Structures are given as structure tokens and as C-alpha cells.
Amino acid sequence: MKKLVCFVFAFASVMTSFAQNAKEIVSKMEESFAARCQEGVSFNSKWSVSVVNGRTTRLVANMSGESEPEMLKEAVGDIDFLTSSVSMLEDRTCEVFPDRTMYDDGNTIWKYSASNNEIGIYNKATYGSKSPCYVDFLSDIKKNYNLSIVDETDDLWVIACKCKPVDRYLGDGRDLELTVCKDTFDPETLVIRDKDYYITLTDFHYGVTEDQVTFHPAEYLAATFSDNR
């Protein structure tokens, strides 16, 4: 009986230690990331959906500024339906998709569509669709999620971030899976899981110039401009 009690106590201690370690790792990651973001940050984004039993899934890709729903062909497994490269510096963002590029300076949005070589200019306040602020998911993690280390290598920690029950009940909660580099405490990958889709952020780099996130009309002289402000 004494051995059993000792085992239970030791197991509880290990679990508590893991929880504390996860919080410490995430805390250091958040501090480091917030400081480095002042230099500007770039990364790749991939929106995906898992299809089970060959069912066709219908989604509205609000994050891209499109109001039409996208129909995914019947398949089984994970399907990537939206990819982009994102550069952010202060309030400015440039997001490059395979078929379009969007610039956002906090007040105005410039959307270049490659299919018709057209640039639409919009007032951000009335545009009707917000660009997702991906980096918000890398702040307040230890406050908003229950954390645990679920995997580990020589170089990385993998941390499960479970949405707290109150947020899940209110319908605005998502689960995260965060991979953190051991030597720098930089994020390696972040997976954001919603009930219908998940987003994977990878290839984080620091150091973005104003030029990278600024719309330059001279680069699009052959395009047709449509001012919708």
C-alpha cells in the first residue's frame, strides 16, 4: 500500500512539474516573440480541412476577403485550401497568396488580383472582412489555455494548448499546438484548430522592412485601379 501511495505521489509530482515547465516555456516564448516582433516578423500560413468518409466540405474563406463559399472536392484526408506568405511590421501587413496580394496599413487595404490584373483600394473600416492577426495567437497563451508538454526532441518542445472550458462554452475558443525551439524559445510551428478547419503557421523569421509591407503603385502601372473608398 505504501508503495502505491508513493507511486501516486511521484506521478502527481511529475505531472505538476510538466505543467509548470510548459508554462515556463510558453512564458519565455511569449516574451521573446513580443520583443522580436518590434523588428517585424514573417511566416507562412496554410489553411486546411480534414475530410472524413469522402464527404465534400463547404467553407466560407472570410479571411481572404472573399464572400463566396469554397467547395472542396470529395476526398479523404487533409486538404489545403488557402496558403499565403505573411510579412508584418507594426500596423502594416503584406499577405501574398498564389493568385493575389493584399497590403494593409491599418487604414487602407490594397488588393491586387492577378487573374484580372486589377487593384482594388478599400477603406479598412468598411471593407467587410478583417485580415486575421495571426500573431495574436502567440500572446496570452498561458493565460487563456491549459498547457501540457505532449512531445519533445533534442531541439524542440511540442506543447498542447487546450482551450479553457468557459471560452469553449462561449463558442470563441480554439485549441493550439505550439512547437518551441529549445535554444532560442522561438516558435517553430503553431497549429490553430477550429471546429471546421485548422491553420498552420511555419517558417518564422524576424526583420521586416517598411518597403516589404508598403504598397508601391509604380510596381503596378499596367494594372487597372478601382478606388472603393
Image (cartoon, rainbow, N blue to C red):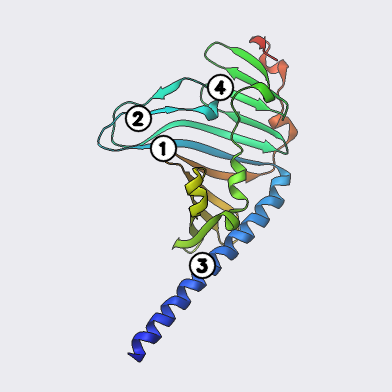
Question: Image quadrant of residue 57?
Answer: top left
Q: Secondary structure at mark 3?
A: helix
Q: Residue at x 63, y 14 (%)?
A: 119
Q: Residue furthest left?
A: 53
Disc assigned to residue 19: 3
Residue matched to label 1: 196
State yes or no: discs 3 and 4 in contact (Cβ < 8 Å).
Answer: no
Between discs 4 and 2, the one toward the N terminus:
2
Q: Residue at x 52, y 44 (%)?
A: 202
State yes or no: discs 2 and 3 in contact (Cβ < 8 Å).
Answer: no
The x, y position of residue 8, in whole percent, is 39, 80
Between discs 1 and 3, the one toward the N terminus:
3
Question: Image quadrant of residue 110?
Answer: top right
Neighbour tally class for label 4: few under 14, some 14-19, many 20 plus, Cα within 10 Å: some
Q: Secondary structure at mark 2?
A: loop
Q: Residue at x 64, y 55 (%)?
A: 30
Query: Gap in Å between the C-alphas at discs 2 and 1?
Result: 9 Å
The x, y position of residue 18, in whole percent, is 49, 69
Neighbour tally class for label 1: few under 14, some 14-19, many 20 plus, Cα within 10 Å: few
Residue matched to label 2: 57
Q: Amino acid at mark 2?
A: Thr
Between discs 2 and 3, the one toward the N terminus:
3
Q: Is residue 228 visible?
A: yes
Between discs 2 and 1, the one toward the N terminus:
2
Query: Gap in Å between the C-alphas at discs 4 and 2?
Result: 24 Å
Q: Amino acid at mark 4?
A: Arg
Residue matched to label 4: 100
Nearer-the-camera pick, 85 or 66:
66
Neighbour tally class for label 2: few under 14, some 14-19, many 20 plus, Cα within 10 Å: some
Query: Gap in Å between the C-alphas at discs 3 and 4?
Result: 43 Å
Nearer the observer: mark 4 or 1; the answer is 1
